[in-house]
Amino acid sequence: MSKSLISRRPRIGRGGSAVQSAGERQLSSLQRLGWKPFFQQQLSLAELGECEVVRVMAVHRSQLQVAGERGEQPLPVTPVLLAEDIEQRPTVGDWLLLERESGKFVRRLERSSLFQRMAPGARQLQLIAANVDSVLIVSSCNDDFNLSRIERYLALVREAGSRPYLVLTKADLCADTAAYTGAMQGYRDLPVALVNGLDADSVAQLRQWCLPGETIALLGSSGVGKSTLLNGLAGQQLAATAAIREDDSKGRHTTRHRALYPLAAGGLLLDSPGMRELGLANAEQGLAATFDDIGALARRCRFADCHHDSEPGCAVQAAIDSGALDERRLHNWRKLEREIERNSRTLAEQRAGDRALGHFYREVQSHARERKQRGD
Ligand SMILES: Nc1nc2c(ncn2[C@@H]2O[C@H](COP(=O)(O)OP(=O)(O)O)[C@@H](O)[C@H]2O)c(=O)[nH]1
Ligand SMILES: [Mg+2]
Ligand SMILES: [Zn+2]
């Protein structure tokens, strides 16, 4: 299944237009892959001469699929790529330096943005994608629409350092779309588009958010129409959608792995498996940015340590009483805040545990060495 998805992704061809100079061609093919001055300025003069840069297009168990000015190629996952610290491992969207001659991995470039979540059922982080400029948060105009979930996505996107947009799909099936766009009116700085993902003209309005050289991720529950949007924006069938899935027996997820898909216009789109669980970890700033209205109110509470329950002079409760603040928003803010705290604790414990285990192994090894030296 994942194999057929890879092959459906158009490969970046070798070479380019004959009228361009070699320099221009190199620049434009990399820029089409999302190369920006932020990455360029990280290269030393020596690296410019000796290395090629490639972008991680997809991550598979034993290899990465990377693309650069010489086209696409697999890169085996070697021990150097498996850094102990999960955050340091390459993920989809990362830029890597390879030795021009040998193709060997040299280093990963610093990221302009990083998406991570608490891996469901595990006590560790999972990287979702790096170097994503914008995120289309996708929700349908039906029961899938859920403000608290949208706020969770917003916290994640703002923490990652990407620009959020909201795409409300299945507008064609909805009698009262105003109910959905109206609910989003309080969310300043969040552009909203109402689309029918099956209609090319309707999807075309999203192109202004998917400009050449930009990397855009799709985020939303399974079935909301992410892959349909990807295909509509690409103008061709790149990702399997629910309607044409080949294998029904394994559940409803049709997108099995995360991959970057180059759009004809020059942007790159990341389609990811419907991530039902997007646990927030290390997302304090993203949360604060998403709930900055509550933060501003809280600063006006009489007591600096106000819990916004029943304290006198609570500006947050006053805003709820006056109807200026939705009580659900306060509850969701608290819920997400608790979740982040809980996950931070888990990660800290895990790290402490790893350190203790590492210490234990080193002890055992040094005892073994001593015994050997003594000839026991
Ligand atoms: N009527 C209508 N159907 C849609 C729309 N967007 C997606 N669909 C359908 O919804 C189903 C799920 O779409 P898919 O793209 O696979 O969702 P994904 O899981 O988010 O990738 C498919 O049958 C699509 O044809 C839309 O805007 N209008
Ligand atoms: Mg999909
Ligand atoms: Zn208060």
Image (spheres, rainbow, N blue to C red):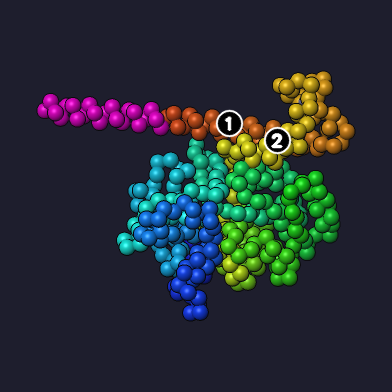
Q: Which residues are magenta?
A: 354-376
Q: CA distance from mark 2 to mark 1?
A: 14 Å
Q: Residue at x 49, y 30 (%)?
A: 348
User: What kind of secondary structure does the magenta stretch mostly adopt?
Assistant: helix
Instruction: Give residue 147's position: percent from left, percent from top.
Output: 74, 45
Question: Any mark on residue 342, and which?
Answer: 1
**Disc 2 target residue:** 333
Instruction: Give residue 180's position: percent from left, percent from top.
Output: 80, 52
- Quadrant occupied by the C terminus: top left
Of all residues, the one furthest to the right in this rendering is 322
Residue 277 as seen in the image, left or right of residue 75 = right
Q: Is mark 2 within 8 Å of ligand 3?
A: no
Residue 26 as seen in the image, left or right of residue 291 = left
Badge 1 marks a residue whose secondary structure is helix
Q: Quadrant of residue 195?
A: bottom right
Residue 40 in sight from this viewpoint = yes
Q: Residue at x 28, y 27 (%)?
A: 363
Q: Residue at x 64, y 53 (%)?
A: 135
Badge 2 marks a residue whose secondary structure is helix
Residue 101 as seen in the image, left or right of residue 198 = left
